[in-house]
Image (cartoon, rainbow, N blue to C red):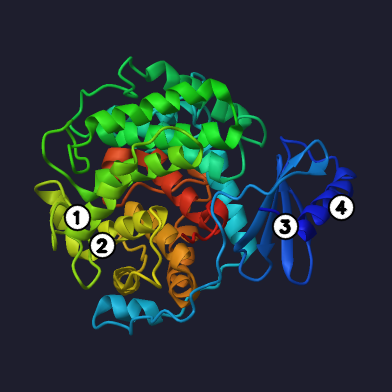
Amino acid sequence: MRSKPLLLLGTALLSVLASFSVTAQQPPGMLATADYLFVVRGEWLFQFDVHSLELRNKVRLDGGAAAELEPVFEIVEEPEALEVAGAPNGMAGDAIDEPQTPRSRADIAQALEAGLFWLATHQDESGKWDADEFMKHDTKGAPCDGAGNPTHDVGATGLAMLAMLGGGSTLRSGPHRDNLKRAATWLRQQQGDNGLFGTNSSNDFIYGHAIATYAMCEAYGLSKMKVLKQAAQKGLNYLEMHRNPYSVWRYQPRDGDNDTSVTAWCLMALKSGKDFGLEVNPNALKLGLAYLDEVTEPDGRCGYTRRGERSSRNTGEHAKRFPADRTEALTAAGLLCRFFLGQNPREHKIMVAAANRLLKQPPKWDPDAGTIDQYYWYFGTYAMYQVGGKHWRAWSKRMEPAVVGSQLTAGNAAGSWDPVGVWGESGGRVYSTALMTLSLEAYYRYARIVR
């Protein structure tokens, strides 16, 4: 697949930007026209709509010349004809119509860079992101708070890697190239002979492994470094071994239990591996879709382990602070996976129903109301960007002020997000910051998908 006008422009744009001496350690070179914003970051030329900053195309640049177009996914027009749900009754419906403080694209870009900078400065020299002791890097002034659970270092490192990869860096180029090299090295060192990243000492260890596998597949594919291939493939092989026969995933290997949350991360890892030429059992992807159908209500809501079941919560105070009916995290995860697995909302109306459900509970930063769910906002933002059109505009109208407006701007925590959401106590500040940074990258992390 080629785009001749863009290829020609890529060559010309490189010549223009060369005069500014853009290097891998400097901010990306940019050139704007009346309709498009062109960005050179590392070895890639990105073409964005100048008004919405939505990714329209990208070209790999090699040695000063434009090379063959290599999109991860094909781009389609926004499905404007999809019906948007009317405002629901109650708090969520009122929230959709609340006046919002406009966020310029410069605000979003600045927030994104600040988030990536915070992650970069809180990485251990070994390459890992320490979920509970990251504040040891705050050598001057009051250290950050917001420690997570130390059993989540593998998952936190994977999320931070995904954020840096989403920001345009690879292990070969970009401002966070060295961070990614150290992180990939550390993850490889944590991988056992059976392919598992980390250990199985915690009940939910599979989350960390799935996220780390996803990150390693992306790092391998985007960086084109063969040294990562074996680690990524072994990670995928472990997921296949862990998966229930004729079904999907949950915490323990092949114990007969399945859940949407774990399965979503596993499916994303497998899809990434497949896109980058790694070996993936095609039946695992087919069974993933069958499972999503099994746990999804006709109204679009995707359940946790069965139809109608809300997201899990810890017992006691946690469930009181974060009522499960304040989120549609699993509906968002299921919707995004449907896109990744090749479904189209024009052909599968259940996807439109799911998108309409998400609009009823848009992002809202309100610690007292228990509405902060950064896990939900991450999946929801990527899913709604894929839906596009009116759905995306309505969602982003709420997402942008909720995310950008809650980012800290002072002290050692500047650029990060407080881990005050549903799973903040487990993941900590690294987890919250990586997810929110990833959410801000939704405009160009993936092009819109059509299958």
Residue 204, how many percent across, how many down? 21, 34
Q: Nearer the viewer, mark 2 or mark 4?
A: 4
Secondary structure, mark 2, is loop
Question: On the rendered structure, is 9 left or right of 429?
Answer: right
Question: On the rendered structure, is 180 left or right of 362?
Answer: right
Residue 405, how many percent across, how many down? 48, 61
User: Which of the pair 90/328 is nearer the observer?
Assistant: 328
- Disc on res. 311: 1
Q: Nearer the viewer, mark 3 or mark 2?
A: 3
* Amino acid at circle 3: Ser
Secondary structure, mark 1, is loop
Give the CA separation, mark 3 to mark 2.
41 Å
Q: Nearer the viewer, mark 3 or mark 1?
A: 3
Q: Earlier in the sequence, mark 3 or mark 1?
A: 3
Give the CA separation, mark 3 to mark 4.
15 Å
Up-down: is 23 above or below 318? above
Give the CA separation, mark 2 to mark 4.
47 Å
- Disc on res. 327: 2
Give the CA separation, mark 3 to mark 1.
43 Å
User: Which of the pair 200/56 is nearer the observer?
Assistant: 56
Residue located beneath label 3 in the image: 3
Q: Residues within 10 Å of mark 1 (few under 14, many from 20)?
A: many
The quadrant holding residue 174 is: top right
Q: Earlier in the sequence, mark 2 or mark 4?
A: 4
Residue sitting at 79 percent across and 60 percent down? 5
Residue sitting at 85 percent across and 40 percent down? 21
Q: Residues within 10 Å of mark 4 (few under 14, many from 20)?
A: some
The answer to whether any part of residue 156 appears in the image is no
